[in-house]
Image (spheres, coloured by chain):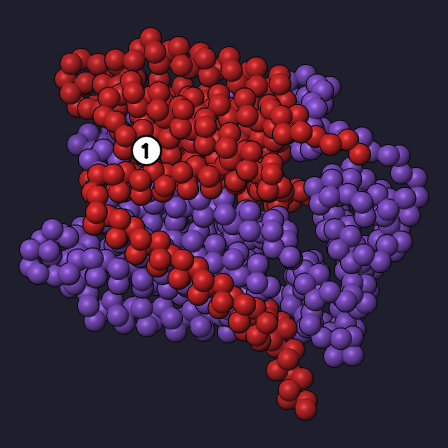
Chain colours: A red, B purple
Amino acid sequence: MQAFGLFDLMGPAMVETVLLAGILSYLGLHILRRQVIFADLALAQIAAMGATIGFIIGMAPDSTGVWIFSFLFTVIGAAIFALGRVEDARVPQEAVIGLAYAVAAATVVLLVAKAPDGAEHIEQMLVGAIISIKWPFIAVSAVLVAATAGFHYWKRDVFLAISEDPHAAARRGLRLRLWDFLFYLSFGVVVAVAVRAAGVLQVFVLLVVPSMAAMFLTERFRAQVGIAWAWGAVVGVGGLVLSFYGDVPAGPTVALTEGLSLLLLGIALYLVRHGGRAVVRVGLGAGATAAVLLAMFLLGRALGDSPLAMSRSEARQQRIEQEVR
Amino acid sequence: MHDLGAIDLMAPAAAECLVLVGIHSYLGLHVIRRRVIFVDLALAQVAALGTAVGLLFGMAPDSWAAWIYSVLTTFIGAAVFTLTRIRHRKIPHEAFIGLVYAVAAAAIVLLVEMAPARGADSIGKVLTGAILYVQWESIAFAAIVYSLVAAVHVAFRKRFMLITTDPEGAARQGVNVRLWDFLFYLTFGVVISVSVRTAGVLLVFVFLIAPAIFASMITRSFRAQLLIGWAMGTVVTVLGLYASYALDVPSGPSVVGLYGLVLAAGMVVLHVLRAADRGAAVRRVLAGVGALAATGLVVAGLGEAMLGTPLAEGQHHHEGALAHHHDEGEPHVPEVHTPEDFAALLAEASPDEQAKHLAEHAADVDLLVGAARATDDESIQLAIATALAEAHPREAAGILLGILRQGTLPFVKSEALERFQELAGRQFAYDPGGDTGANAEALSEMERWVDSLGG
């Protein structure tokens, strides 16, 4: 048997992760400023729905046609989010966007319900298949990422203005809806590629974690962009390495590593900024976490062999046997 | 023998949904006012995470122990949400909650992979649940738990409403906001840990949010909102379940889809009714609908046009130096001539390769049936039966019956039972944990059903 080294197996995935981390962490900074966290999850899910529809009507799962479908659906979703802003203060826009997410996810499940490998498809939609990515795909995504980044760099002042203070931007005479739509459009281009490579969860995590880390660390936008990219890329590649040596699936491992990195950063910053009392608190928190984990482990051991761990049908059977005796 | 109609088949699911509507519409109104839409999705996912952790210790997903675990993880989640309300100027709390959601979902995928009785199936179930197969005893249990929570909320309704709508004011009045926040999330978590088991993450989320949005659009009064939410939830649920029965599609996602439609329709109607110039509003709506329909047509046409062109083909001619061929179009399949070969091929394949092989040879019924006979691996027989179920229910039922009769693994048998009941559209008193003797009656009843298919 031929053994694969880390880079033989993970090389393309690492390159793609660095690429995606670059653009997604930048877009994440906008998303956080716009306070529409759900929008990215919903758009990622809508992209996945488009891909599923292409797949259902008979396109190969890795064809360009499927990507075009995924992109079209994302654009339509983006247009609806941008144009249909609910002005009703009683219903937060997030609620409507969240609902769009749920409906898109349910649609995917409905569509693949009758496909023979439906469950696999759902899993792949969530966690992607970054490990099996090919170089031509990476080239395509590099071009798209570069195009999006170039556009955003060119119009950086406008994009920042509408994300930070839309009302002030509108007063200055910027066409808010048009730029909102252009923002979501470029977002859609990136998300359609990223979801196919990395899955809904990893895309969401790459959008949110690096930008949050950067916003914790600095206030300056330029520095934030740099930090976010570095954070997303380094932690993402780290997650891939972990998944290689731990022999666990890549997508979820990267998502977990990114989440964990933010937790560690939060604790570190808390310690640095608050000093002595913080150390005690963090110690207590860590102790409590360890105690809870230990308790859960012991409980699991105790319950695992008990009748409580049986499925209902097994439990019913045992009851019947006891009655017979 | 009698055919089971919509009512027999759907009664437990409908009852469960109505029980869900009662408490979730109410909690949803709180969630909307608190503007933490992600919380329920995150808590539901955390509850599912508890079940996945239970898998590691060998707890069956529908066991009591697994439920205890999901309650525990939900409590931890509730504590985390209450304590970590970080007031960063620029980062919304939603971002953290969303992150908990994504991390929990990723962890579930990993855990299911690591658990001894693994299966990509369970991930789909976590998302969409299996409300059609809910048992009356679980409905009764859910009703009791929800009533207890409802009683707590009725007893302290003023407190809960105050900390939801005006936390600063409550703090000024000397109310311990953190404690009550925690109590809110605690009760919320208990409810969700129960409902996720049967309804799945997506359905629970929609049960919370959709009636609450609908009612909030119509009125400001909390009582009226609650009544509207209940009415809307009940009607949509019953219609959605009926549609799923009539169209033969999964019930959970159908209800989700119908909620979305009703909500969209409600928004349009309200927009027209409340507009100063109704004529203009109607024109806007028509233009919007027209634009959507046109886009749909364009997309459909484009799909049609792309089919058969290189754009719709896979990229399998590109070489990749990878051991894993996850989404390659055509893996290298050895030629199979005999059922024995095919059975051997399936035995060596990973689950997704198996699915691919089966999909490829789905048309060759004799080959598949022969392979099911040639192997004595129950899970392969199950996979074959699943692949055949759509086009050749009789053959599939025959294979399933074989598993149910001779099988040794309870979880394969319970899966086979589920498939069989799906095929038959009715329940059988078969017990996957029991031996053939105990199940003799159910087995002969099943056999009679298979025979009744003729052929």
Instruction: State the image quarter where residue B55 is shown.
Output: bottom right
Q: Residues within 10 Å of mark 1 (few under 14, many from 20)?
A: many
Image side of residue A192 versus residue A265, left or right: right
Q: How many numbered discs?
A: 1
Question: Toward which corner of the image does residue A212 lie, by quadrant?
Answer: top left
Q: Choose top left, top right, bottom left or bottom right for residue B358.
A: top right
Which residue is drawn at the image coordinates 57% and 59% (left, top)? B56
- Residue found farthest to the front: A276
A152 lies left or right of B427: left
Q: Residue furthest bottom?
A: A325
**Farthest residue, direction left:** B173
Residue at the spot x=77%, y=43% of the render?
Answer: B349
Task: Decide which of A180, A144 is in the foreground and name it.
Answer: A144
Vertical order, B429 against B37 (above or below): below
Image location (x, y in percent) of residue B133: 57, 63
Judging by the rendered image, the residue that carries numbered circle 1 is A212
| Residue A102, position as x, y percentages in the image | 43, 43
Locate the C terminus of chain A by quadrant.
bottom right
Please state which of residues A281 and A43 is positioned toward the viewer in this rendering. Answer: A281
| Residue drawn at point x = 81 percent, y = 48 percent | B347
Chain to which the residue tagged by mark 1 belongs: A
Look at label 1 and name its amino acid. Answer: Met
- Horizontal and vertical percent for residue B317? 73, 19
Is any atom of residue B336 visible in this view?
Answer: yes
Quadrant of the drawing holding the N terminus of chain A: top right
- Quick one: SS at disc 1? helix
In percent of width and height, residue B292 lies at 42, 27
In the image, is A99 to the left or to the right of A11? left
